[in-house]
Amino acid sequence: MTVEADRARLLELLRTLSYERRKVVLASGKESDFYIDCKRTALTAEGHALVGRVLWDRVKKLSPAVRGVGGLTLGADPIASAVAMASFLEREARGAGETVDAFIVRKEPKGHGTGQWIEGRKTIPDGSRVVVIEDVVTTGGSALKAIERCRAEGIVPVHCLALVDRR
């Protein structure tokens, strides 16, 4: 399948599985007459594969190359996982190429053990370039929190991608 075909099918899944017309209060505090829950799509087998391939296509075009993808838990988690998986599967199929690893930015530091803010840092060293991922963006507040935390933890966000822009 082509990236264009993947994108079209992903949009169809987002419309049928993730979109609802109803009143909601968003994380930003704003009210909306529709709701989008990308996890409903990203957590299906097909949706996970499509999200991974579509966003991996975007990430690998960034230069210089990035080492990781991730964002604020919970919305970014399946998306970052899908992109990391897609990068590995493509490298396996071609026998060469770059990969990215996923990371998760906690909303609060881990309450025990090491007190980590970011999971997945073992393979993403300090100074690494990363892409911050969001599921749905309205004001960008979650992305900004993730970017600030990445910077504070020594990794360098160079781009931000969202699966859905509510505007």
Image: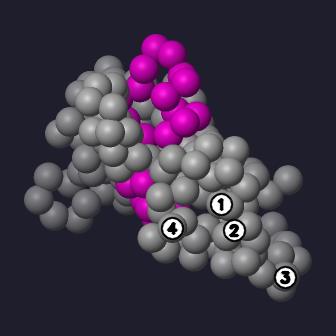
In the image, 54 versus 38, the foreground residue is 54
* Residue to which mark 3 is pinned: 21
- Check disc 3 and report its element: helix, strand or loop: loop
- Quick one: label 4 or label 1, which is nearer the N terminus? 1
Q: Which mark is residue 46?
A: 4
* Residue lying at the far left of the rendered structure: 113
- Check disc 1 and report its element: helix, strand or loop: helix
Quick one: label 1, few (<14), some, or many (20+) residues within 10 Å?
A: many
What is the C-alpha distance between the residues marked 2 and 4?
Answer: 11 Å
What is the C-alpha distance between the residues marked 4 and 1?
Answer: 9 Å
In magenta stretch: residue 149: no
In magenta stretch: residue 72: yes
Which residue type carries mark 4? Glu
* Residue to which mark 1 is pinned: 10
In the image, 112 versus 142, the foreground residue is 142
* Residue to which mark 2 is pinned: 14
- Quick one: label 3 or label 2, which is nearer the N terminus? 2
